Image (tube, rainbow, N blue to C red):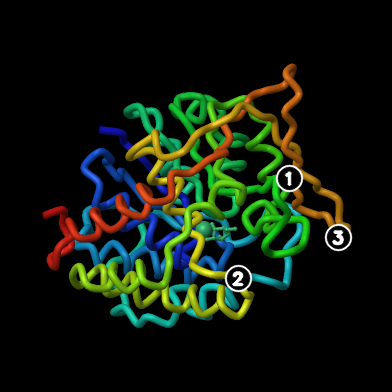
Amino acid sequence: MTRIIIDCDPGIDDAIAILLALASPELDVAAITTVAGNVSLDRTTANGLRLLELAGRGDVPLAAGCDRPLVRVSDRDASEVHAVDGLGGVSLPRPTARPVDEHAVELIARLAVERPTTLVAVGPLTNVALLLARHPAAAARIERIVVMGGSGVGGNVTPAAEFNAWFDPEAASRVFSSGMPITVVGLDATHQATLSAAEVERLGTVGRIGAVAAGMLRFSLDFAEREGREGVAMHDPLAVALLVDPSLVTLEQVAIEVECGLGPARGATIIDRAPSRLTIDYGAIVDRPRFAALLHERFAALGTDGLPG
Ligand code: RIB
Ligand code: CA
């Protein structure tokens, strides 16, 4: 069993990633930490709490992290992609729980020195960069960081940049150049990890939580259709799925540079395959059918009471 902490900005695909992790007996979700990104920190934090309660996992601590990127605050978020509430307009009950009274960076550092832990970072990397700066010794105890971010095939928030790298490029640069054991799934991989409308509808038939997931994903499907794309890319769930079944994603060794200038290429990630600098495992090929089957199987296992059946 792999002990993980999920640092995220729920966000529809973050929500699916969290629920997939909670439904997978191979993973022990030790904590959820939240960061500003898709929507504000207040909303990503409330959404994280809602998702834990939806899954009956109020036992998992959630800590809020940074409410803005390290250097430059943008006036854009991703509410167009995730709806203003961040969860596709699916109304989940207001959470009864509150975040723990500890900053996300402190919680990650404290848990990292307790037991071997993998950090799954599926939002902007602000919290992770601060962890490296504030608690380098604790960060060094982290077994692996699995990141959803970056792209070698152009951007999604701008023509040049993928959203998580774009929202906080300085943080992404700090993490990618850290020398830590890092696995990254960028758009090269996550654009292969799509669900069709029919697969989303099938997900909606596997129980209460599957129905909520399908409700959120219908918003994503509508957005994708407006953008002229078929199906919905499951960016963040792929980062979790590769921990559940590493055979789902073929990796290659690369280095990643991040453009931190203030021009139109800000947040672009240059994927460098020069043999002398290969430090990151980068997702190249995804077995989409088996990925989609895993998602369906795990949501079905969530049953109606929210716990793995
Ligand atoms: O580019 C996709 C990433 O940006 C995902 O993590 C999604 O949730 C958004 O944060
Ligand atoms: Ca995310």
Q: Quadrant of residue 224?
A: bottom right
The residue lying toward the viewer, choosing from 144 and 174, is 144
Question: Type of residue at label 3?
Answer: Pro
Q: Residues within 10 Å of mark 1 (few under 14, many from 20)?
A: many
Please state which of residues 228 and 253 is positioned toward the viewer in this rendering. 228
Q: Cβ of disc 2 within 8 Å of ligand 1? A: yes
Q: Real-space Cα distance between discs 2 and 3?
A: 18 Å
Q: Looking at the image, is mark 3 or mark 1 earlier in the sequence?
A: 3
CB under 8 Å between callouts 3 and 1? no
Quadrant location of the N terminus in the rendered image: top left
Q: Amino acid at mark 1?
A: Thr
* Residue 78, label in figure: 2
Label 2 residue SS: loop
Residue in view at x 34 percent, y 37 percent: 245
Find disc 3 in the rendering and name its residue: 264
Q: Residues within 10 Å of mark 2 (few under 14, many from 20)?
A: some
Residue at image point 31% right, 49% down: 21
Q: Residue at x 68, y 58 (%)?
A: 167
Residue 196 place in picture, x, y as percent: 43, 67
What is the crowding at mark 3: few (fewer than 14 residues within 10 Å), some, or many (at least 20)? few
Residue 161 appears at what percent x and percent y? Answer: 73, 55
Asked if residue 71 lies left or right of residue 280, the reply is right
Q: Quadrant of residue 273?
A: top right
Q: Is 71 left, or right, of 251 in this rendering?
A: right
Q: Which mark is residue 119?
A: none
Q: Amino acid at mark 2?
A: Ala
Task: Depth check: give the residue in front, 80 or 111.
Answer: 80
